[in-house]
Image (cartoon, rainbow, N blue to C red):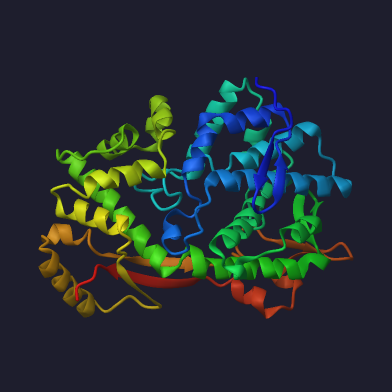
């Protein structure tokens, strides 16, 4: 094992981050983790916010740092945390996104057949645990919520977890959307443990309101920005077309790892049946898709070349977002215009338009709750603990319908 020698990473959000020990340093150095340098945190969002070029690597390191600060804070409040638990929790958050593929969430269910990135993260975790001779056992239990002390898993994944504390602050910083700023340090210092659950001390309630408000605003302004939704829909259609052509005998150039996923409809069971598939998936990142697009823009297939050219040149489909689905008559008329202008068959036309719905909910009151501990020791769901109307409103799910299409005028 390479000696750590207190390696330091200079992070633009938090400053200098020290990698705490040799094991974590070796995990970060592993090719599985280094691959995250080539996967953008926000997928296609850099087409809208040019600064949004940060990666899953940035986010994972930042999350590890915040977890470190959280565990130090809990220890200062006499929460018993062993050195093994401390290390396990850091590794769990460090690897929480290791299963992401190219463009993060955008292609999650398109390159693979209904395989969630969390399931792939477990596969990567298990492989790394084998390579590191079982030293990731405790971290894996925390990650999969199998560890008896449940609050550790809550810090990794819940409605107020370290993952969200980092990505909100980081995404706000790199997009320049100031509405997403949160007081992560303040929130961390207000966390405590009660009956093996993470709670927020009552004096931190306004920081939580700001956290939920920032999350809701970031969804509308960044994560669900209509132009980003349109660009992602184009990318999804592009990959679907590449898979369709490949599986119907048409030659489609692609990098070796991407080619495998175009040729086969890989499900979770295939990863268990053939461990080499995980190694191939581990070679995939955003650059595979961008590089392949440069071949596809010259392809004889109108859809493949057309979508590739538009994405490479940032000619994003127009899009409407509305509370109701667009009228069928309006959609049919528009589709006819598109079909004529681009000389598309009825089958090809479906790749040149996109539709669906998006939802925004800052706080799901029916899920794992954010709990407030009052000064008298009572523990309440934040919706009941506060008289702030904003939090009650933010527990409502808002759904909008979208339709996107290429220029026709």
Query: In the image, is 230 to the left or to the right of 359?
Result: left
Q: What residue do we see at 83% from left, 67% from top?
A: 203
Q: What residue do we see at 54% from left, 35% from top?
A: 33
Residue 72 position within the rendered picture, expressed as x and y whole percent measured from the top left: 81, 45
295 w.r.t. 341: above or below: above
Residue 269 position within the rendered picture, expressed as x and y whole percent measured from the top left: 39, 33
In the rendered image, is residue 147 in sight?
no
Q: Which image quarter: residue 29?
A: top right
Counting the numbered discs, the total is 0
Residue 124 position within the rendered picture, expressed as x and y whole percent measured from the top left: 52, 32
Query: In the image, is 394 to the left or to the right of 234?
Result: right
**Front residue (pair 124, 94):** 94
Q: Which image quarter: residue 130?
A: top right
Q: What residue do we see at 18% from left, 71% from top?
A: 335
Q: What residue do we see at 51% from left, 30% from top?
A: 31
Residue 149 position within the rendered picture, expressed as x and y whole percent measured from the top left: 74, 41
72 w.r.t. 185: above or below: above
In the rendered image, is residue 52 in sight?
yes
Q: Which image quarter: residue 7?
A: top right
- Figure quadrant of the C terminus: bottom left
**Front residue (pair 405, 308):** 308
- Figure quadrant of the N terminus: top right
């Amino acid at each position: 094992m390479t000696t750590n020698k207190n390696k330091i990473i200079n992070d633009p959000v938090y400053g200098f981050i020290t990698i705490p020990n040799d094991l974590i340093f070796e995990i970060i150095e592993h090719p599985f983790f280094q691959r995250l340098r080539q996967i953008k945190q926000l997928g296609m969002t850099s087409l809208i916010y040019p600064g949004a070029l940060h990666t899953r690597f940035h986010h994972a390191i930042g999350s590890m740092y915040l977890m470190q600060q959280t565990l130090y804070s809990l220890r200062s409040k006499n929460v018993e945390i062993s050195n093994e638990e401390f290390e396990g929790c850091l590794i769990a958050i460090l690897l929480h996104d290791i299963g992401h593929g190219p463009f993060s969430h955008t292609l999650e269910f398109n390159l693979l057949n209904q395989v969630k990135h969390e399931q792939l993260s477990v596969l990567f975790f298990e492989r790394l645990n084998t390579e590191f001779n079982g030293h990731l056992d405790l971290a894996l239990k925390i990650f999969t919520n199998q560890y008896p002390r449940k609050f550790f898993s809550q810090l990794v994944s819940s409605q107020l977890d370290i993952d969200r504390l980092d990505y909100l602050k980081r995404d706000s910083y790199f997009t320049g959307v100031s509405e997403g700023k949160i007081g992560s340090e303040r929130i961390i210092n207000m966390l405590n443990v009660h009956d093996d659950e993470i709670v927020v001390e009552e004096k931190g309630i306004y920081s939580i309101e700001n956290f939920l408000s920032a999350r809701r605003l970031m969804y509308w302004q960044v994560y669900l920005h209509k132009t980003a939704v349109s660009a992602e829909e184009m990318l999804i259609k592009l990959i679907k077309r590449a898979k369709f052509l490949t599986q119907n005998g048409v030659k489609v150039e692609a990098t070796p790892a991407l080619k495998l996923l175009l040729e086969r409809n890989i499900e979770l069971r295939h990863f268990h049946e053939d461990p080499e598939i995980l190694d191939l998936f581990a070679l995939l990142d955003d650059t595979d898709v961008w590089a392949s697009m440069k071949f596809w823009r010259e392809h004889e297939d109108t859809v493949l070349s057309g979508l590739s050219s538009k994405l490479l040149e940032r000619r994003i489909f127009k899009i409407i977002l509305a509370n109701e689905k667009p009228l069928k008559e309006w959609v049919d008329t528009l589709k006819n215009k598109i079909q004529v202008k681009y000389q598309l068959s009825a089958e090809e036309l479906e790749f040149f338009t996109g539709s669906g719905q998006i939802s925004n909910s800052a706080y799901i009151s029916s899920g794992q709750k954010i709990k407030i501990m009052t000064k008298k020791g009572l523990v309440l769901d934040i919706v009941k603990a506060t008289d702030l109307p904003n939090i009650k409103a933010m527990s409502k799910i808002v759904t909008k319908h979208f339709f996107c299409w290429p220029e026709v005028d």
